[in-house]
Amino acid sequence: MAIVCEACSGEVQGYFTLAGRHWRPQAFGKGLAIFRGMPYKGLMRGVFDKAEASLREVEVRPARADERRRWDALMAAHHYLGFRQFAGRGLRHVAAWRGHWLALVGWQSGAFKCAPRDRWLGWHRSVQFRRLHLIGNNTRFLILPEAEGMRNLASRTLGLSLRRLSADWRAAHGHPLELAETFVDPSRFRGVCYAASNWTRVGRTKGFARHNGAYTDPHSVPKEMFVRPLRSDAAARLADPADREEWSCRATPVRYAREELRSLRDLFAAMPDSRRGQGRKHGLAAVLSICALARLAGQRGPAATERFARGLEQRELRALGVWRDAGGRWTPPSDSTICRVLADTDPDALADVLRQWAAPRLAESSDLPALAADGKRIRGANRAGDGAHFETATLVTHGGRPLASRCCRDEGGETAALRALLEDVDLRGCAITLDALHACADTERAIVDVHGADHVLGVKANCPDAFAQLQAVDWDAPAARRHADGPAKGHGRIETRRIAARDLLPGALASFAHARQAFRVVRERTVVKTVATSVETAYGITSAAAERAGPDRLLAWNRGHWQVENGNHHRRDATLGEDASRIRARHAPANNATLNNIALAVVFHRGFRCVPEANLHFMMRRGDALDAILKPD
């Protein structure tokens, strides 16, 4: 490849130009894949003239939808922390001069807990969880290489970004921001640009990182914390117990352009490879793509995956990107290679692949979407050694389609894993159904205040006060709204479900401040063969008002929640063989569970409702299976 560089008017062999520098394709890594298909003219803008530029002509604006990949690639390539995604909601700002990008600023949701900030605000803990969505965290700030050395650019960019931050956040996420915050590593930076932009230093953190919802991982790098009110009375407003109408989260659907969709193999290629470089013949993307392909064809375990891969044709192996030997033949990975990849790959990175692939493809509905979340113990994790993941929390639609998953290292940490999982997905306008294990005040606040969603919680004796109050309600009163479903026959029994729902006054349940309705579900079952009957009564609460969720919808949500058990956990255990798996090494059990979720997501996306039928289809038509892995749609 020979191109003429507009920056130096010289011919450059095997390179392309970005941000005023020449890059080898192999040096830029995933950035080349991101830019593939773009004209070279868009990449070779020439060397930015720092002497000619004027700070007054620098402007800051949000990155457009078609610029997100370029923003992400530049941040990942040049920032010392790299970049994969925002935690929660995010906003990308671009500082440009006459069309040339000079700096990038990334904002995301505020830190869940931070003692220096909380002391400075002086807010009560009950207020804190309702106001976290009003804080923006400056998680990334990058001066691009071609603009390095330009005086006062950092403070100018930061000031312009702050001026429009609240308005841009409102346009993107439906509510304004009151406070900006950031963390500065004192071993690298002094925070001069923040001080020049009138930020206030509020203290130093203790040096713990958040993992699975708790700040328990010491990293020995305490950070200096700075805050910047976006209005003069921001601190008083945030600490005020009274809520304001403009702070409520309003649902704004996120739409993805076709060019933003990425294939599974591209997402695998963007993952970090934890293996040593010595003897690494097969790329991580090739091995994981073959694992996913084998699961679509109904093959389980590393040995079965190897046998399946050896039956692939040369053109199919070439498309998957496996190793090519000295004789020119494409050679699939062995079962030992597959075992090492499953054992060494970071489970959180693989879980991110599921979320990044499934979220844009989730069909948008005019009806209020409902999602079910629950945890499942990973088979064999207790014998996987140090650092193993014991449980996996999964978020699925009420149709059974996996949307995201998150693994938990702490035994019995399902609740913490679930809260971490909810932070990974845009939940605005959704209804999240949970069982009684997750019925607690912190989870309720996180769903309603932080994520802008509604909850549907089952209430049992683990919440004794609320359970006693619901039992004491007069469900036969005329004020109760009722709905019945059935009788319906299935699984050898006839079942009838009846629901009664009543409004709750604010503060009626001390443990659940956002509960707007309470409901009781009565299930009557008759076994066809024995004619034995049983009656089961369940109680629950929801933050959705009656005009948004009537008794018919509440009954549908209550029943649809079991899709996480029947549609996900049972399919993984019985159909995909997760419960019979003998995989034990390190991260392999957790990664095996995530690959099963990825396979189920692909099956549902391709229109199948029966997994064995999908396995047979993909086994007989490997071209369709390859398209599901290699093509973005």
Image (cartoon, helix red, strand yellow):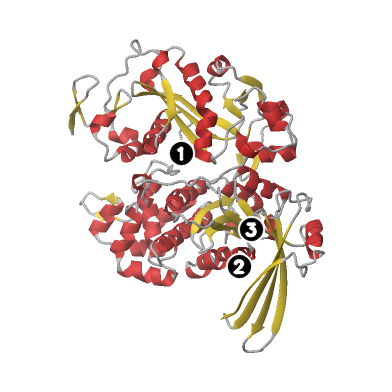
Q: What residue type is labelled 1?
A: Arg
Disc 1, SS: loop
Q: Where is residue 395 in the image (x, y as percent from the top left)?
A: 55, 56
Q: Judge by depth and name the residue closer to the eye, 400 or 3.
A: 400
The numbered mark at residue 84 is 1
Residue drawn at the location 57% of the way across and 31% of the way down: 137
Q: Where is residue 554 in the image (x, y as percent from the top left)?
A: 63, 63
Residue picked out by circle 2: 559
Point out the frontmost of discs 3 and 2.
2
Q: Judge by depth and name the residue closer to the eye, 487 or 223.
A: 487
Q: Distance between the residues labelled 3 and 2?
A: 11 Å
Q: Judge by depth and name the residue closer to the eye, 509 or 144.
A: 509
Q: Can residue 120 be seen in this view?
A: yes
- Residue 130 in the figure: left or right of residue 575: right
Q: What residue type is labelled 3?
A: Leu
Label 1 Cα crowd, 10 Å radius (few <14 / some 14-19 / many 20+): some
Q: Is residue 111 visible?
A: no
